[in-house]
Amino acid sequence: MLKKKDLLGLYHVSAEEIVEILNRAEDMKALLLAGRKAEKLLSGSALITLFYENSTRTRTSFELAGKYLGASEVNVSASSSSVQKGETLIDTGKTLDAMKIDFIAIRHPLAGAPALLAANVGASVINAGDGMNEHPTQALLDMFSMREKFGRIEGLKVAILGDIKHSRVAKSNLFGLGKLGAEVYMYAPATLMPKEIEKLGAHVCKSMEEAIEGAHCVMGLRIQLERQKGGLFPSLSEYSRYYGVKDEMLRLADKDAIIMHPGPVNRGTELTPSLIDGDRSVICEQVTNGLSVRMAVLSLLKEYREKNL
Ligand code: CP
């Protein structure tokens, strides 16, 4: 049983709640693999996807998750809504709430926007990525993919490489993996490594080799040019040469190591195309698992709502 009406981040979610979501996601994946896409678990519920930033994976999988479980689903994108006429986030939320909706999955460029919305609406708010803060369902699907491959999270070494400074995925993974007993090793150019990240439990590495040595999971992160003012590294080609993960480096990793990336991938920048498409890559599986995890989150929040609201 989840303990709150909203899922805003993994920082405030307990290990028990994370395990419950992963276990429920296993049930949801079994439904998907059996071709069952017309379930009734969310029958009578309504989901809004409210996206102020672009998305392919997260938005589509929230929409499909709702539809596959029988919810009514509507997308509101900032570019075609009354946000363009100056409506505030709170007024937008209250307007949607007045339509008797149950869930809002929100993506917003500003950290804290989902929490502000959650405090002002009766619907359950799910953070689908807020600025450089958190992206909890991405980390949950990453953890689900790791557990599926290794049968456990505890004791895994997870190497996270790339633009950590701007990455909400890195932060949510750090919180979630730490709660379940994995060790997170990070490597990035100094300009893309947050100064205080060690205090949150990360091992900050001096070389990529140190991060990848013995790693079970090697996760590349996208260079987020849209959040940078520039000048953090000389050029994409230099970044790729010195900080991109190359095939030969995988020899240092655990023999069963998997390659992960939250997407979208800049091919040849963070990872070589042969790593992205190779046998060790679980990048497409992560997308499938994202659907299962979002189905799990929606169904568990519905149970919370039925018992508490
Ligand atoms: N991983 C992720 O959040 O991808 P989208 O931006 O396509 O949703």
Image: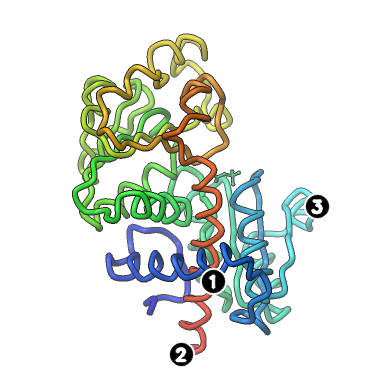
Q: Nearer the viewer, residue 83 or 144?
A: 144
Badge 3: residue crowd in 10 Å (few <14, some 14–19, many ≥20): few
- Residue 241 vs 169, above or below: the answer is above
Give the number of the mark in front: 1 or 2.
1
Which amino acid lies under the numbered mark 1 shown in the image of this protein?
Answer: Leu
* Secondary structure of residue under mark 3: helix
Q: Look at mark 2 in the image and give the residue it sits on.
A: 307
Question: In which quadrant of the rendered view does residue 121 lie?
Answer: bottom right
Residue marked by disc 1: 298
Q: Which amino acid does label 2 sit on?
A: Lys
Q: Position of residue 221 (x, y in %)?
A: 45, 33
N-term mark: 3 or 2: 3
Residue for point 63% across, 74% down: 69
Q: Tell me the number on the disc at residue 80.
A: 3
Mark 1 closeness class: few <14, some 14–19, many ≥20 residues within 10 Å: many
Residue shown at 25% from the left, 57% from the top: 180
Q: With respect to residue 233, does 171 lie above or below?
A: below
Q: Type of residue at label 3?
A: Ser
Q: Distance between the residues labelled 3 and 1?
A: 25 Å
**Comparing labels 3 and 2, the label whose residue is closer to the camera:** 2
Cα distance between the residues tagged 1 and 2: 14 Å
**Ligand 1 sits in which quadrant?**
top right
Q: Residue 261 carries which label?
A: none
Q: What whole-number distance in Å separates the C-alpha atoms at marks 3 and 2? A: 36 Å
